[in-house]
Amino acid sequence: MAVSYIDIGPLFLPVLLGLMVVKFFMVVLYFMHIKFDNKLFGRLFYIGLGLAVFVYAAALSTFQFFAG
Amino acid sequence: MAIIERPTETPDVTNRGTRPAPKASTNYGYLRRPVETTGWRSWAFTVDHKKIGIMYGAVAMFFFILGGLEAALIRLQLAGPNGTILSADKYNQMFTMHATTMVFLFVMPMAAAFANYFIPLQIGARDVAFPRLNALSLWVFVFGGVFLNTSWFLGGGADGGWFMYAPNSSVPFSPTNGVDFWGLGLQITGIASLVGAINLIVTVLNMRAPGMSMMKMPIFTWMAFVVQMLLLFAIPVITVALFLLMFQRSFGAQFFSVEAGADPLLWQHLFWIFGHPEVYILVLPSFGIISEVLPVFSKKPLFGYPFVVFSGAAIGFVGWGVWAHHMFASGLGPVSVAVFSVATMAIAVPTGVKIINWTLTLWGGKLTFTTAMLFAVGLIVQFTIGGLSGVTHAVAPSDTQQTDTYYIVAHFHYVIFGGAVLGLFSGFYYWWPKVFGKLLSESLGKWNFWLMIAGMNLTFGPMHIIGLQGQPRRMYRWTEFRAGQGFFNLGFWNLVATIGTFVLGVGILFFLVNIWVTHRPNSKTPPAPADPWDARSLEWITSSPPKEYNFARTPQVSALDEFFHRKYEDVGEGDKHEYVQKMTGEEVIQFEEDNADPNIHLPAPSYWPMVLALALPVMAYGVIYNTLLIVAGGAIATMAMFGWALEPADAEASDFDPPVEGDETSKELSNV
Amino acid sequence: MSDSLITETVKDAVEIVKDHADDVHVHDVHAGDDHSGDHGGHHTSLGLSNTKLAMWLFLGSECLLFGGLISTYMLYRNRHSENLGPDQLWDIPFTSATSFVLLTSSLTMVLAVSAANRKDLRNAKIYLSVTALLGGLFLAGQIYEFTVFYREGLGFTTSLFSSSFFTLTGFHGVHVSIGIIMLVALIGMLSKEKVSGDDAEAVEMVGLYWHFVDIVWIIIFTVIYLIEFIK
């Protein structure tokens, strides 16, 4: 909780997104057993995840979404 | 899961003691499980992938004819100046429903028919991974298609074009319920595709016969597998788009209200992120079919099997990065246009690889021009024309000129009719004896082929000219005054296109006549031989039509083109291959049947897939007319899901009429 | 305490995966005379469970569904009237609390799966009930939050922002509700012993779905709620 009280300015966004990714993969890898299970399950899921990130990031960037 | 017990000489002792004694069915109250093997029940409640495949095909064929009649009306309207057959409004509905019907209710389900029927047979499985889900896909598709078309009787069809650009499809511009029917109907058929995709992917990954590695799979199964992967990831995208449209139209959401600041490109992006993979969803199954047909009638293995596989997979992947080439004229900005233009040119490469592989399969082969082969070669030629005009769209400046003209219409009909539809017809002629046990007439088949080829070129060829002359894609009438002069006279070429449509129609009529001639009650067509084409792949290592359990014993696979390698022996030395026949196809099949598996387990039929499927259109009517219907549909769905989940694996002995005894081995669902 | 919890969880996970692989293998051996199983007595070529493959495929597909909804929201998040935007409406402490509830439910789900795998049906039922309760609590929080926003004037049709916000979080809420229904059904089936020890896979399947709904919320909470606090 302490982090939210420290003003880290421009680092806020990367730290926030970084924590999100860490949490996301902790659940996927450990709670959903991807780390221990057959690799195929993970691959199928990551294809979907990767495609989603790719197509929607591309679509948003045609809207100049990331340009500021 | 229920059981089919083959009657064996030596009764299976281990099973005797464990079988429960007959008791009243506890699952359906006073209803019995639908275990009939004849009559309509044996079709309506079946979970057999072959019957489901046939029903998919029959329903898709019905929609093909319906979509064809809609096309005929469009062409009649445009045959001469100032057409009066259709009003502007009806014309809009006609081209929208023609495209929707052909894409979603004909080509996709027809490909699903082939995939359903042949994937389990080609990989040596007894059924798909989830037989009841398979039945669910079928009925969801059928009810969704019917729901979509009831709009004709309830205020008119959708009228926004098949890509239904918002905000043009919101209420002020399209006040009837047509677009609501369209959106909800596609939502429903989308569920069918998604469920089917998951089912078939699991089947291909997990149900292959022993020894069949991924790279020993028949090529049609490979292409169908890529298609299911595309469906799996493309359907949710259009699901989002359709939900947004539904919320916009039925519940007052703002997604496409430009006056509230909405971005009109949102719909276009969502639609085409789905829409471009959809193009490959339409055409890849046909690529798979002709990749089976060409080697068989060239008496050569498919040239460069791994290249055909990987180029198919590459098309599948790159197909996700090119969608915005449908939007070059929408003001995306130069960077986006350049990126998508290059990506689009890149995707021509794997497609070209395939065409080269097919050509080299033919090269030096002993060609037999059966009707199936003619359609396959027809596909190579016609699709290449469509592919080349496609490359002209990849070049953004030239595309800007062609956008929304008949040139586009020409292009995608060469690709979809010349690619997808010719391939499907090739599949009909090639696999007809496998599915129905009789060969279609070759002479009628040749009439069928040549009339279709002549018809399609007469219809879609002139559209290149009238398109480049500037006739807009969705113009409902044209005037003599602006038709132009001489060779480029729009009137002349429009008339040619209309005549071509009827030639095409007669060609397809020959196909229907062919079916009738072959199967009419007193038909003289003899049963087809077990291996009429000297085929190569696994689906032929069983009788035609296959028994309910597919294979007498689960085949052991040791080679690509397993059936061929069982029939022929390589007597060549070193690198030189020389094949001599050691067995006929009949002998191979007989050998399998002589060594049949003693026990075969097949899934039991079920009511629940149809009940669950029925709930969806009820809910959809509810969205349009009355919220109470949504609740009713939801209740039906919940009931069906619980019934589904609690349905036991085996049909109980008391479900059979007369009830079978506990340890009888005659608990069969088919004439084994 | 948390360290041992983590090691325990990891150990359990390895165990579960191994166990289920064995189950599939057992089915394989019995292929031909075993009447149970989803594969109709058919062997599986990868030695994997059909249901689990199907679930992962479905979850992969769901990524594109939520991706589309999140993108729609991202595109429209600034398109609202002067005083009805995210920075005026968000109540971060409250939403943090409901998020914490949902994340905790993931933990109890893990415990339920491992209990089911140990064939400890009593504890499995308890943990599943707690998971369902926490899910219900999260939903109640979401409904409360929607009501507050609505009182402040933010309806579904108010602006592009509101339409896309309610659609995204609503879809997530529907997913949570379906998850709760599945949990309750599962508890019922465990009570009637429909799910026997070897078929603890059903619990694991619902678990996968539940965790997925949870990771979707991790993304939503970050990019929809927290990100508004970039100054």
Image: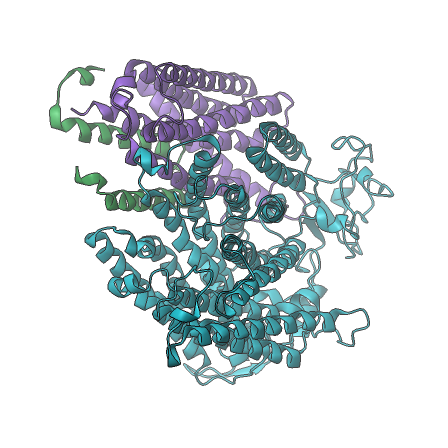
Chain colours: A green, B cyan, C purple
* Side (left or right) of B313 relative to B334: right
Q: Which residue is the extreme one toward the front?
A: B481
Q: Is residue A56 above or below residue B625?
A: below
Indicate left or right for C59 with C184 as reference: left
Q: Nearer the viewer, residue A58 or C36?
A: A58
- Please identify the quadrant where the C terminus of chain C is shown: top left
Question: Can you give x and y, in whole percent of width and height, for residue B311 in the image?
Answer: 37, 64
Tell me the quarter of the picture where residue B236 sits.
Answer: top left
Q: Which residue is drawn at 73% across and 49% down?
A: B4
Image coordinates of residue B399 in percent, x first then y, are 30, 63
Q: In which quarter of the image is the N terminus of chain C?
A: top left
The one of B513 and B526 positioned closer to us in this rendering: B513
Q: Residue at x 65, y 78 (%)?
A: B444
Residue B377 coordinates in the image, percent (x, y): 49, 77
Residue drawn at (78%, 30%) of the image: B29
Q: Position of residue B65 (x, y in %)?
A: 61, 62
Between C115 and B374, the residue placed more toward the observer is B374
Is residue B461 among the parts visible in the rendering?
A: no
Q: Is residue C157 left or right of residue B199?
A: left
Number of numbered labels in the structure image: 0
